[in-house]
Image (cartoon, grey):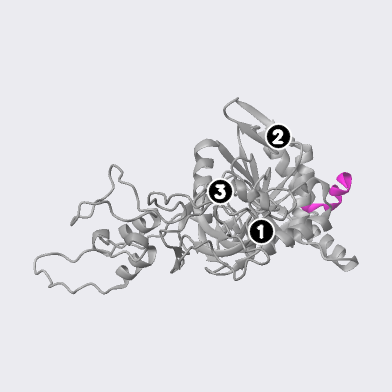
Amino acid sequence: MPEVREFTLPDLGEGLTEAEITRWLVEVGDVVAIDQPVVEVETAKAMVEVPCPYGGVVTARYGAEGDEIPVGTPLVTVASAPEEGDGKPAVNGVEVVDGTPAPSAQPAASAASGAKEGSGNVLVGYGTSEAPRRRRRARPAAPAPAPAPTRPRSAPRAPATRAGDPADARTGAPLAVISPLVRRIAREHGIDLHTVPGSGPQGLILRADVERAAARPEPAAAPAASAPAAEPEGERVPLKGVRGAVADKLARSRREIPDATCWVDADATELLAARRAMNAAGPKISLLALLGRICVAALERHPELNSTVDTERREVVRLPAVHLGFAAQTERGLVVPVVKDAHRRNAQGLTDELQRLTDAAREGRLSPAELTGGTFTLNNYGVFGVDGSTPIINHPEAAMLGVGRIVPKPWVHEGELAVRHVVQLSLTFDHRVCDGGTAGGFLRYVADCVEHPAVLLRTL
């Protein structure tokens, strides 16, 4: 007989504790291979396709698209495929009704036993490096006495009574609601969950039930002659996913980091001319890559700004490698991909990696590892048509260089008034890691390299 295994949302790494289901990649009844992606989820850092470490037939899946689920919550149950001679595929007697096993289903194995199937260990928290091994067919066992009816581990369970849970006004029983998302949607639409019939197993109220209730037109009420017209409530946008993660990080940065900003205007005419000469002689070099190379050279002279602060031990930790983050605006919000070991890359290498990460960011394919671990951030807000900014430091880093738009302006060049391409550079830094003299020296060196790119030859 095939065995049914329950696969739960694994640890996605980087301290992530929950994720939102964005798209199911399998249906109930589909046959999946070991380590085949079964669902796409959105974490606070990236979109991730979650592979299942078991192979077989999908007998149930849990959660609707849009639900937020914590690590360890069941995602799917999978019945192992039968061996040769077993006949038609079966699911161990599991009756599937609308994607949910009937209460008689008895998933028999845990994730620990499933690890022996030889998963490639593609996510943190599950899978092994062992090669797949053929299972021996077990000898038929003598029939055991029928156990007392129990609730299946893999089936959705009605919520236990907790202090503060709203009770059904008619029966006094706890409301059949599991998902916090369902409760929140009901609150936002002013829906009394006591009036919502649940379409899930055992009367469970699902997200679709609440959304249907919200879509129903409310009966028109007779206008009150004396009551003033109510002011319309503003639109509520949940802070979740990438937007919520950005909000939390920015708020923490403002709370913990005593930041300061200095800025300078620089003549970028020679830098643009140098880039044109490079592009004429070989593969194209991006302006952002040149600015990144300048940042790396400046950090070699002023390592105080490539650091972080250990608040518990009251120590400044100067970091040996430069992992260069850069701000990128996407449809999902602001993200900061990280070029690892930027100090080991030349202008061409930086161009290639910046392009790869930018493409992945726009397509929502960045992994959590590609969005973490930065030591210094480069923020080119000039692409939005603005000259200057005082950005918030990307916690736990110690500094960020901002670059405004490059525009023709009147400028005194070699003692004469001329039209030159001018850019405003700003440095926001953690005042705990250095004083203004160090920050000013860093920014002045960056400006000198922008105005006279030949200065960079000393570091190449």
Residue identified by numbered label 3: 110
Dot 2 amino acid type: Glu
Question: Mark 2 vs mark 1: which is more N-terminal?
Answer: 1
Camera-side residue: 268 or 316? 316
Q: Which mark is residue 304?
A: 2
Camera-side residue: 146 or 172? 146
Percent x, y of residue 425? 67, 51
Which SS class for mark 1?
loop
Graded by Cα atoms within 10 Å as few (under 14), some (14 to 19) or many (20 or more), the crowding at tag 1 reads some
Q: Main secondary structure of the magenta part?
A: helix
Question: Mark 3 vs mark 1: which is more N-terminal?
Answer: 1
Which SS class for mark 3?
loop
Dot 1 amino acid type: Asp
Camera-side residue: 195 or 26? 26
Q: Disc 3 to disc 1, how far (Cα)?
A: 17 Å
354 lies left or right of 30 = right
- In the image, residue 109 above or below residue 79: above
Count of all numbered marks drawn on residues in the image: 3
Dot 3 amino acid type: Ser
Question: Mark 3 vs mark 2: which is more N-terminal?
Answer: 3
